[in-house]
Amino acid sequence: MDKRDLFDALDDFSQTLLVTLAEVEAIKKHLKSVVEENTALRLENDKLRERLGEVEATAPAKGHKSRDNLRKIYADGFHICTDFYGQRRENDAECMFCDELLFRE
């Protein structure tokens, strides 16, 4: 290998290193922005969880009042199920359809 070939090979290697270094810098910049976005989203998520906890603690149970009304109607001897709604239960007998509605989670 003569001096000219050696110089050309070193020059090509140097150019390849510069291109690789530029790519690494671009990846680093992108990674930095992703980490910053991730940190911001984590903070926002924590604040939202905190706010949700406050709202859940102060909000009345959803559907609790309507379920109490259905229990009262059932206790008065009437069906609350979709099949027999409003009909009087014979001898206040239990109805599995009504029970399913009352005790559904």
Image (tube, rainbow, N blue to C red):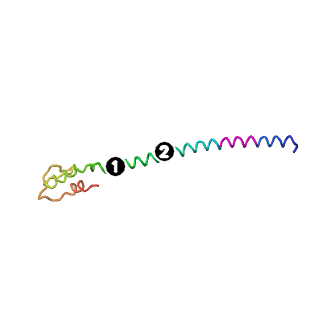
Point 31% across, 51% down: residue? 57
> Amino acid type of disc 1?
Glu
Where does the N terminus fall, quadrant-wise? Answer: top right
Q: Which mark is residue 95?
A: none
Secondary element type, mark 2: helix
Q: Quadrant of residue 8?
A: top right
Residue 27 is left or right of residue 95, and the answer is right
| Residue 44: x %, y % from top left | 44, 45
Query: For this rendering, which residue is in front, 62 or 73?
Result: 62
| Vertical position of residue 12 compared to residue 60: above or below | above
| Residue 10: x %, y % from top left | 80, 43
Magenta-tinted stretch: 14-23
Query: Which of the two discs, 1 and 2, labels the residue nearer the N terminus?
Result: 2
Where does the C terminus fall, quadrant-wise? Answer: bottom left
Decide: few, some or many residues near mark 1? Use Cα within 10 Å; few <14, some 14-19, many ≥20.
Answer: few
Query: For this rendering, which residue is in front, 33 or 9?
Result: 33
Secondary element type, mark 1: helix
The residue where tag 2 is placed is 40
Is 71 contained in the magenta span?
A: no
Query: For this rendering, which residue is in front, 56 or 43?
Result: 43
> Amino acid type of disc 2?
Ala
| Residue 78: x %, y % from top left | 14, 53
Q: Quadrant of residue 93?
A: bottom left
Prevailing secondary structure of the magenta residues: helix
Point 11% across, 59% down: residue? 91
The residue where tag 1 is placed is 54
Residue 105 is left or right of residue 13, and the answer is left
